[in-house]
């Protein structure tokens, strides 16, 4: 097969005629004549060794400037289809060498898989965040990120949006909730950070690997030509990582470095976000919020989340949607003051009974603001449970009050 008559492409002067993986075979040639000769040779080889070719699965793909020209291809009397895209080892490769097809495929796969996970969430998952999150990490992410060390760091922004939206739905938060806040609550990295991580780990493997494998040769050639391999430095620099430093990091340390870098950026964004002045006071780290495990009744957990994000049904929230100035977002029960978090939790007479039952016993001589922060940022189970019980009771009281209006 090594004949120059096949016009094989070369990487670093090594001729590459075929790629073999399990029962998969790829023939490579720089032109039509070469490929036709190879196909003929393949047929002779198969006949001599009594091997069968699956003609319907065999496709031709032409890459480069002549990729749009369609030719007729035959092998042993069978027509071989010329395609624009081909799924090779789980990754869709385009004849124009863009990742558009693969990214569109991932997007569809993501929507379909999340649909299934959502079904689980609303049935056996008991509408609890933890079981959904675990499935997301174990089932969804590996499927979506498969091969990202190859197709990264390009990323369809739509994919990031899918992640943001699904967790807004799972936490029952409104669409206006910033993604940074949700990521902090769940200690959730962006898909971009995960892809960058797999990309940089691949870079580590390539630079430390001493073998002369094909991929290593490609890597060296690309470095010389300023192609694909140069992206690695750009990505590393964006996380304040130098090549030397990267070489000495073990995979776990690299993961921490990237995720912590992003978490810090998220925390900075949260502290200056217009969304809520309270949230940065409740959430000062980028750890999974413990109440999500503690509150195993979905309605209770949701009511608590709403208070933390200050999105419980209130004149405050409604006014925000309608663009009403803060001072005019007056309490629904006629208190003539804005229905903000302090009023809702500590003052409004509408919620006196649950407040006295659940909150008052825990409050000492704190100011109003301090009390709110104390109740909604505590990681002590009895405080979380009491505050959540207040949140749910208040929500129900308000709903029935509004209904009667
Ligand atoms: Zn009131």
Image (spheres, helix red, strand yellow):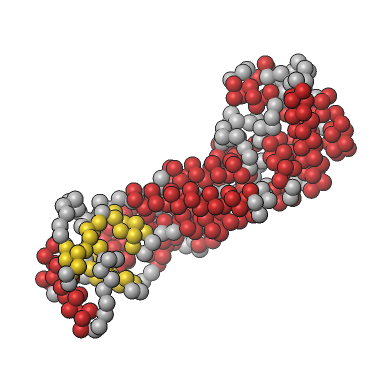
- Can residue 280 be seen from the camera position used here? yes
Whole-percent x and y of residue 96?
25, 51
Question: Residue at position x 77%, y 17% from top?
Answer: 334
Q: Nearer the viewer, residue 244 or 52?
A: 52
Q: Quadrant of residue 41?
A: bottom left
How many labels, in total?
0
- Can residue 12 be seen from the camera position used here? no
Residue lying furthest bottom? 49
In the image, residue 342 sits, relative to residue 200, either above or below, namely above
* Image side of residue 363 versus residue 54, left or right: right
Whole-percent x and y of residue 170?
61, 44
Q: Nearer the viewer, residue 160 or 135?
A: 135
* Image side of residue 203 versus residue 5, left or right: right
Question: Residue at position x 50%, y 44% from top?
Answer: 162
In the image, residue 121 sits, relative to residue 357, either above or below, namely below
Whole-percent x and y of residue 24?
32, 71
Residue lying furthest front? 77
Question: Residue at position x 68%, y 36% from top?
Answer: 306
Placement of the C terminus among the 4 image quadrants: top right
Question: Residue at position x 51%, y 55% from top?
Answer: 141
Whole-percent x and y of residue 233?
38, 52
Q: Quadrant of residue 85?
A: bottom left
Placement of the N terminus among the 4 image quadrants: bottom left
In the image, residue 325 sits, relative to residue 205, either above or below, namely above
């Amino acid at each position: 097969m090594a004949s120059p008559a096949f016009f094989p492409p070369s990487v670093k002067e090594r001729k590459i005629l075929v790629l073999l993986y399990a029962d998969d075979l790829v023939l490579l040639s720089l032109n039509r004549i070469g490929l036709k000769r190879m196909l003929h040779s393949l047929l002779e080889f198969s006949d001599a060794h009594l091997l069968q070719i699956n003609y319907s699965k065999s496709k031709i793909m032409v890459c480069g400037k002549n990729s749009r020209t369609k030719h007729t291809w035959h092998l042993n009397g069978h027509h071989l289809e010329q395609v624009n895209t081909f799924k090779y080892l789980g990754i869709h490769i385009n004849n124009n060498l863009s990742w558009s097809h693969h990214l569109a495929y991932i997007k569809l796969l993501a929507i379909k898989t999340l649909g299934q996970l959502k079904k689980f969430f609303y049935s056996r998952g008991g509408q609890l965040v933890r079981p959904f999150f675990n499935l997301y990490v174990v089932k969804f992410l590996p499927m979506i990120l498969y091969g990202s060390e190859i197709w990264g760091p390009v990323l369809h922004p739509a994919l990031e949006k899918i992640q943001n939206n699904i967790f807004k739905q799972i936490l029952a938060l409104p669409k206006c909730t910033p993604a940074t806040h949700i990521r902090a609550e769940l200690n959730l990295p962006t898909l971009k950070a995960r892809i960058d991580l797999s990309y940089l780990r691949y870079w580590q493997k390539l630079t430390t690997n001493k073998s002369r494998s094909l991929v290593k040769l490609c890597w060296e050639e690309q470095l010389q030509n300023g192609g694909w391999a140069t992206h690695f430095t750009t990505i590393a620099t964006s996380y304040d990582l130098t090549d030397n430093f990267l070489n000495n990091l073990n995979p776990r340390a690299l993961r921490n470095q990237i995720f912590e870098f992003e978490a810090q950026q998220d925390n900075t964004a949260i502290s200056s976000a217009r969304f809520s002045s309270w949230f940065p006071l409740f959430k000062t780290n980028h750890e999974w919020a413990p109440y999500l495990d503690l509150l195993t009744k979905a309605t209770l957990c949701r009511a608590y989340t709403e208070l933390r994000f200050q999105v419980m049904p209130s004149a405050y929230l409604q006014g925000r949607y309608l663009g009403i100035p803060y001072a005019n977002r007056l309490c629904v029960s006629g208190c003539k003051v804005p229905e903000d978090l302090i009023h809702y939790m500590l003052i409004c007479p509408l919620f006196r009974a649950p407040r006295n039952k659940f909150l008052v016993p825990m409050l000492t001589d704190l100011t109003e603001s301090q009390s709110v922060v104390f109740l909604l940022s505590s990681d002590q189970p009895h405080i979380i449970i009491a505050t959540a019980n207040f949140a749910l009771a208040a929500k129900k009281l308000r709903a029935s009050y509004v209904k009667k209006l």
